[in-house]
Amino acid sequence: MVYARIQNPLYMDTKKESNGILDQKPTHHDLKSEQPPSVSREKHKELVDANTLPKEEAVLTTAPDVPPRITRDHPVLLQVNLVTSTKMEKLNSQYKYEKWNFNGSIPGPFIRARVGDVVELSLTNRDESGNPHNIDCHAFLGPGGGSALTTAEEGQTKTGRFRLQFPGLYIYHCAAAPVPVHIANGMYGLMYVQPAEGDLPSVDHEYYVMQSEFYHEPPEVEDNGRPSSTVEFSYPNALREEPSVVVFNGHESALTTEKPLKAGVGESVRIFFGNAGPNLTSSFHVIGSTFKKVYRDSDVLSAPGQCVQTVGVPPGATTIVDMEMLVPGTYTLVDHAIFRLEKGAVGYLNVSGAPQPDIYEGTEPPAPCVGCKLHP
């Protein structure tokens, strides 16, 4: 289905450069202040010309994997290539659904950058349905978060440059009209912007988890009298905020039977968590563990919260949580609006290692929980 299109004179062709969005580069002191740093013409003149920066191709990973941390101590022209398309994929154990995506996956690839980098983002639209697509990245400062500069019609590539000013974990998504439809169909991902000086403490494992909802109509009845195995998007259900499916990383079994998270006893785990929505607030919780550190709203400059059980993450927001895995077994990722587990919001973190009876022990062996999605 083709939806209403945006027409905007600020669209940028790949052969042109965007100068208006290369603004100020904040100092580390500015980043720690309560108010955003003010910009003077003198400070603007101090910026390094983006064309003189060394070029670097961004390492992009598919969930739940995260790119390695950046160790360089200087900014670069970070080249990010995103491609939009559609794909009929599994939604849950019953149905397939035509999902809209970046680089063939839902969520889109994880992008890692550094404060001071200039992101040169090229968006190629290979969606054969005729819908335009673009990028609104919450880390990009300027009208539309880059969407007006990157809107590409079918077969086009559009490019924009965006200087990263502030650290944190940011959502990016398509913002072509109608915006809710593009997000609801799978067009979102995460970008982590490291501070210019020092990053979060190292951990043994870093993972990428994103929650979202899908809204579909009842399946059509086929000629044989059976319901179809494919379903289509339901705009009325989305307006009523009544999701058919709530999932981690794009479909029901993404973090259970397909790619569960893994760690060992005594190892530390960090989860970069985002909520694409488009409607529901997540109450993110890992059954059997406590978040040793929580970087609320992905504020990586302030002291983290400590010993937190559940974190609220509204649509369009993120959090970063650290855990130390003390006991072997399966830990379950959930939205603690717990009926959502029946709609698919379940993931597993499998921890291997020797039993730890000084921490966790019963008088009898663990009893199986037959048919339980929380305690496999």
Image: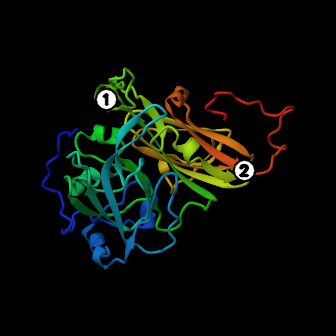
x and y percentages locating residue 292 in the rendered image: 65, 48
What residue is pinned by disc 1? Answer: 234
Rounded to the nearest whole Å, what is the CA distance between mark 1 and mark 2? Answer: 42 Å
Return the x and y of residue 373 as percentages of the image width and height. Answer: 61, 32
Residue found at the far top of this picture: 225
Amino acid type at image mark 1 = Ser
Q: Is residue 30 above or below residue 184?
A: below
Task: Give the residue drawn at x 30%, y 50%.
Answer: 85
Q: In this figure, which colouring scheme has been used for the structure?
A: rainbow
Residue that badge 2 annotates: 352
Front residue of 163/225: it is 225
Quadrant for the N terminus in the image: top left
Left or right of residue 363: residue 49 = left
Label 2's element? strand
Look at the numbered disc 1 and give the secondary structure of its residue.
Answer: loop
Instruction: Indicate the amino acid at tag 2.
Output: Ser
Tell me if mark 1 has few (under 14), some (14-19) or many (20+) residues whose alpha carbon lies within 10 angstroms of its own: some
Rendered position, 136 above or below 218: below
* Nearer-the-camera pick, 18 or 165: 18
